[in-house]
Image (cartoon, coloured by chain):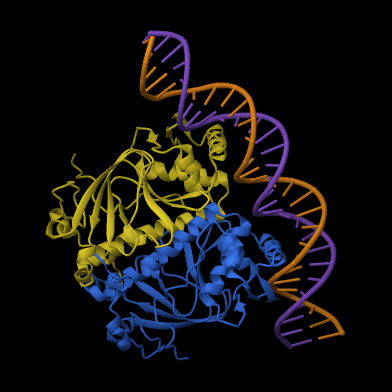
Chain colours: A yellow, B blue, C orange, D purple
DNA sequence: CGCGTAATTGAAGATCTTCAATAAGGGTGG
DNA sequence: CCACCCTTATTGAAGATCTTCAATTACGCG
């Protein structure tokens, strides 16, 4: 009855050390072994704004962000854009996730390097591969949890709360003691992530700054002097650190 | 290269016939076999508004809606509610999904009957069970896809579009030829799903009715005379039918 | 029939967006 | 190094959208 979270985790930590891909050197990449055997692997260098997407039809494809920041997003017919996730280095994106009829893609928020792993050829045998399926489950579960928080934010937080939560979230996920948090995305990207528009984001950032919740060094760098003060402004629990899919610590090159 | 979607599907359809639980008789329940072996199983009868949630700490628990309509929702400290999914009979909800610090639960939109499967005791061995992991992956993937659409709706559709999409979605998922679509939820539930408030939902329903997009027989029953006309009002693809996790067709009492 | 809940509707107010004007950087070429 | 241009960010004012509040109506159930 008294299981630790680790024990319930579907991953098998003891195997991680082996999982180093000859191509990208990410430690703990769940695809490394399969790629070595027979999966197709490609690397994309994307410049800011560039995107990649799955071809039509079913495919079993994954993208791993190696350098830079990327985002998954949907486009509507009339050009409206919604960013679904912000993906930092070490994040694996499941191509399966993409519904067949939606305009959905992985887009570079900054120049970035992305590994593409295509396991379509191995799809049948992977259905019996518990280790692989455990990795996929964990990936999907992590994404689902984040997506659920996103839904709650968009549905029930006002614009001030959304931007405040966003800044706190980025600080928690990407901040380092002593150094300012770097926003690797434009105001438009922030707006498209938060369901607002550029002008509103800008206006709210000034309000947050004037309220003393955040101190900006430049338009893309800031400190959060008092995270508890930020938490008091939010009706939800403060954001928790990302439990990244892959061990980014061992990232080489 | 030319795989059908079915082949990429992680499930193993040929096993389904066996999967009938002695308790609830749902055909194709992926948990039936494990429950028979050693999992804990409970059934909950929930009256409208009642909810169940995971106890504190890690657990591997699933809920399957047998009768009635349920919803997963989050509550904020100040009482705001956001409905994350609307779950019809045959839907499996993953207890894992619940983040530890959020007030999140499964709530009855109508009186309903819910199976609870607790596999915490089997967690360690299930990490090596490919069939189980494939089922979980499929569940998570389906939920993630729906959640992604939800994010896009809340972020980038205005209130008229949201309600219109919602009505079309419910018609596509639960409608039957010739019969009116039944909304098994209150205006407040709809509002909490769409990130609006009760009054707005009501006002917009009147606008949609006056625009001739929907014909109401009662406040909770309606026809969609022309789905294409509805689709023309939306900047996104019309909703697609649910690919339900479990075969609800064979459902006996 | 009467009561309580849920739904509808109008008017006023708050919030967010749109539009337009201005400011701030960042790079390039002289 | 500086002037110039282009992109991005900021800000104000007006307008649209959504919410709040209050009043009214409809519906279900005893």
Image-based side of C3 in relation to A91, left or right: right
Q: Where is residue B76 in the image (x, y as percent from the top left)?
A: 53, 57
Residue A183 occupies quadrant? top left
Q: Is residue B218 something one can see in this rendering? A: no
Image-based side of B229 in relation to A92, left or right: right
Image-based side of B219 in relation to A81, left or right: right
Residue C27 occupies quadrant? top left
Between residue B73 and residue B172, name the one nearer to us: B172
Q: Where is residue B133 in the image (x, y as percent from the top left)?
A: 27, 71
In the rendered image of this protein, does residue A116 appear above or below residue B218? Answer: above
Between residue C22 and residue C29, name the one nearer to us: C29
Between residue B167 and residue B238, name the one nearer to us: B238
Image-based side of B210 in relation to B33, left or right: right
Between residue A238 and residue A99, name the one nearer to us: A99
Residue at horizontal 63 percent and vertical 71 percent from the top: B186
- Figure label count: 0
Q: Where is residue A18 in the image (x, y as percent from the top left)?
A: 12, 55
The N terminus of chain B: image quadrant? bottom left
Q: Position of residue A120 (x, y in %)?
A: 24, 63
In the rendered image of this protein, does residue B204 appear above or below residue B112? Answer: above
Residue at horizontal 52 percent and vertical 65 percent from the top: B238
Q: Is residue B159 something one can see in this rendering? A: yes
In the rendered image of this protein, does residue B233 appear above or below residue B174? Answer: above
């Amino acid at each position: 009855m008294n299981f630790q979270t680790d024990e319930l985790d579907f991953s098998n930590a003891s195997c991680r050390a082996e999982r180093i891909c000859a191509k990208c050197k990410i430690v703990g990449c769940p695809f490394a072994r399969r790629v070595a055997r027979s999966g197709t692997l490609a690397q994309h260098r994307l410049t800011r704004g560039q995107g990649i997407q799955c071809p039509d039809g079913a495919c079993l494809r994954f993208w791993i962000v190696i350098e830079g920041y990327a985002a998954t997003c949907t486009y509507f017919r009339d050009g409206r854009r919604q960013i679904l996730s912000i993906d930092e280095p070490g994040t694996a994106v499941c191509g399966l996730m993409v519904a067949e009829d939606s305009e959905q893609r992985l887009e570079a928020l900054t120049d970035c390097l992305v590994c593409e792993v295509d396991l379509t050829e191995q799809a049948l045998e992977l259905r019996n591969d518990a280790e692989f399926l455990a990795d996929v489950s964990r990936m999907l579960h992590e994404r689902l949890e984040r997506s659920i928080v996103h839904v709650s934010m968009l549905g029930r937080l006002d614009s001030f709360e959304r931007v405040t939560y966003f800044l706190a979230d980025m600080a928690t996920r990407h901040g380092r003691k002593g150094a300012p948090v770097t926003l690797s995305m434009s105001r438009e990207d922030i707006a498209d992530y938060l369901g607002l528009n550029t002008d509103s984001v800008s206006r709210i950032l000034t309000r947050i700054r004037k309220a003393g919740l955040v101190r900006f060094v430049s338009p893309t760098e800031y400190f959060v002097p008092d995270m508890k003060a930020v938490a008091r402004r939010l009706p939800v629990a403060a954001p928790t650190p990302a439990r990244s899919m892959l061990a980014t610590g061992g990232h080489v090159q």
